[in-house]
Structure formats: structure tokens, C-alpha cells
Image: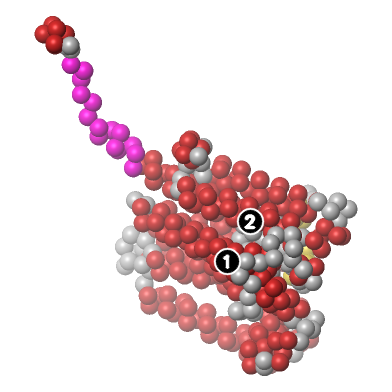
Amino acid sequence: MENLFSKYLKGDPILWIVFFVMCIISAIEMYSASSTLAYGADNYAGPMLRHVGFLFGGAIIAIVVHLIPVRYIRMMAYLVLLISVLLLVWVLFRGVSENGASRWLVIMGIKFQPSEFAKLSVIIVAADMISRIRDAKKDEWKYFRNTLIMLAIICTLILFDNFSTAFILFMVVVIMMFIGRVSLVKLGILVGGLLLAIVFCFALVKTVPEKSMPKMFDRAYTWVGRIDRFKTEKKDEKSKYVITDDNRQVQHGRIAIARGGAVGVFPGNSIERDYLPQAYSDFIYAIIVEEMGLFGGIFVILLYLVLLFRAGRIATKCATVFPALLVIGLSLMIVIQAFISMSVATSLGPVTGQPLPLISRGGTSILITCIYFGIIFGVNRQIKEEYQAPIEEDIPVEPEEELSVVDLENL
């Protein structure tokens, strides 16, 4: 095992173990949670094999990416950002709708979400811009402004069909700017302006009828409805036990978690997988708790916490600002999305449509998440190489001493 990590899988061994354990859990739980997909497929093993194929392909991508120097990733991010903007504009007009949201594009038979590429490129570019701030008086406003313009464009394009993703991306970049020591006054104004904008939009949606608003704002009414239902359930205890078309996901998620108990019913024995919509995607954590119990659910949470902790350790060892911010941003994107997904499945928050990173069913999301891991591994690999190189150079090499005739006789 040690030779495997030292020869082929360079970087943090613990993070590699976390990565592969997540892939294994994903494969096991998808086997159970995809029962409704298998029932409607021509080949009942098709959905499972497709998912395992994406996991295998993602693992290969992570291995390849972690060997790419970070400076090349830094340069390529700007091209990916430009392509992402074009694709996000395209998806607004030609996007494929699924579950009431047009988030997908189909090009040459390949279905993918442009927002996933946008998230990756924004985090890399934001880390680059923040790292270029050398003098607070000369550089800060310039790069803060450029980062804000980028965020405004990308988040606005994502916002129409995926508010939660736009919000998570915005907050991750704000945290990166905070860690990068951007002025607290600027960050305070930015966050305050965002909160005022959210309150204004919420009040607008509550007062203006849906029929009077352009069709592009339909998802805003969906979100307000979800928030209202969540607030109503918290106030009205009786509504928690009534299953309707609007709360079917939430209620069956609760039932799945209640059935899990401490140790669960074990993989393959879930009942709620046949009743819970999106059991293989947004609510897969509920199926995990049902089959693996409380201990299994806590174990999954710990995997994400270990990821965040190890990423923080890697960031502290970086010699420059860019890789440190990059690792922090990528790990925060994974972990925050994971905790939002788990909070939805456990009824601690309104339904958002966020999958569980690397575990939920998905094509684009799995591959992009694997790129996140690959970049983090790559940063750690470069740190180790930088530490080892000076050590090898500084070791003095003493010339071999020739044995004299006397020494030979003594031997």
C-alpha cells in the first residue's frame, strides 16, 4: 500500500483513502437507491453500470489531474471560464429541462451541466485574482472589482435555474476573499448588498403574481414555495405527518431516516428507495442512513470533515497564496454542498436540489468533483516535491576514504 501511494498516487494518502471510500459508498448505495431507474430501464443493471463507469472514469481523471502542475491549471481556468459563460448563455435558450429546471445541455449526445464547469473555473480564477493582491492600497480594489464582476456574471446566469448553486458559489468565493485578507469593509458591503437583494426579490415574488412575471423567473416562485412549506412544517406539528404531492420527498426522507435506527437495515434492504423521488440523487443521504444507520450517516459526515481538515493542513504548508486559496476554495465547495444536501435529506433545511458530492448519481458532477480532488492532490504532491528537493541538495556527500595498508591489516 505504501509503495502504491509513493509511486503512483502522490499527495496526501489519507485524502486518497477518503476519495476511494466515498467512491465505494457511492457504488454500494447507488445499487440500492437506483431501483426505480432499474425498473424502467431495458437493462436493470444499466443505471448501476453507468454510475460505476463514471466513478471509474472520475478516478482516472483525478489521477491524471494530480500530475498536472498547478501553473497550467491556473492558465487553463480562464479559457474554461470563457467557455462556461457561453454555455450558460446557451443553456438559458436551448437547455434541456428536468424536474422543472433547465440546467442541462446535450451536445453530440453528451448531456452535461455547464454550471459544474463554471464553478470549477470561478474558484480557480478567484484564487488567482486574490493571490495577486500584493499591496492593499494599489491592488485590492482592482482585483476585488474583477472578482466581483466575474461573480456577478456567472452567478446571475446560474441563478435563474439553480439558486442554491449560485448562492454556494458566491459564499465560497467570499470566504476565499476573507481568508485572502480582502478588506472587511468591502466584504461587509458585498454581503450586506446580497442580503438586501435577496430580501427585495423575496418580497417582489410574494407580492407580484406569477402570471405577471416573465417565465424566466418561474424558479423564484418554486423557491419561495419551498421556504414557505419548510416554515409551515416547523410551526405546525400536524403537517409533519401528512404526505402530499408537495412534501412527498421530505416525508419519505424522514421515514427512511427513522427506519435506519442505529445500525440500519443494511445495503440492499431499503424500502423507501421505491417511494422516495430522487432517492439516488438529492436524497441519497436518507437512503444511506436507512441502510447504514446512524453510525453510517456519521461516518459519511466524518469523511467530508476529514477532507476539509486535511485540505486546511495542505493550505498551511503552501509557500505561495494561490495554491493555498485554491485548495481551500475547492474543499469548501465540496463540503458546503455536502452539508446542504445532508441537511435537506434530514429535514434541517428546505429542498435545494443539491446532490451529495461524489456519492449521488450524476455524470458531470462526479467528473468535476474528481477534478476538485485531483487538483488538491496535485497541490499536495508539489509541496512534497518542493520540500524534498532542497533536502536532497543540502545533504553533504563526503568523499570515500581509501583504506591504508595499516587499516587493511587491522581488518
Query: What residue appears at the point 21 percent right and 18 percent down from the top-left corner?
Result: 400
Q: Is residue 382 in view?
A: yes
Viewer-proximal residue among 85 and 279: 279
Total labels: the figure holds 2
Question: Mark 1: which secondary structure?
Answer: helix
- Return the x and y of residue 393 as percentages of the image width and height: 28, 33
Q: Nearer the viewer, mark 2 or mark 1?
A: 1
- Is residue 362 located in the magenta-colored stretch of the structure? no
Query: What residue appears at the point 52 percent right and 82 percent down from the top-left corner?
Result: 195
Report the residue that reaches farthest toward the right: 42
- Above or below for 63 versus 373: above
Question: Mark 2: which secondary structure?
Answer: helix
- Return the x and y of residue 137 as percentages of the image width and height: 31, 67
- Return the x and y of residue 328 as percentages of the image width and height: 45, 60
Distance in Å between CA atoms under marks 2 and 1: 14 Å
Query: What residue appears at the point 18 percent right and 16 percent down from the top-left corner?
Result: 401
Amino acid carrying mark 2 in the image: Ile
- Is residue 390 located in the magenta-colored stretch of the structure? yes
Q: Quadrant of the C terminus?
A: top left
* Numbered circle sitting on residue 295: 1
| Residue span colored magenta | 387-401
- Above or below for 101 versus 110: below
* Numbered circle sitting on residue 65: none
Mark earlier in primary sequence (2, 1)? 2
Amino acid carrying mark 1 in the image: Phe
Report the residue that reaches farthest toward the left: 406
Viewer-proximal residue among 86 and 361: 361
Q: Is residue 104 in view?
A: no
Residue topped by disc 2: 25
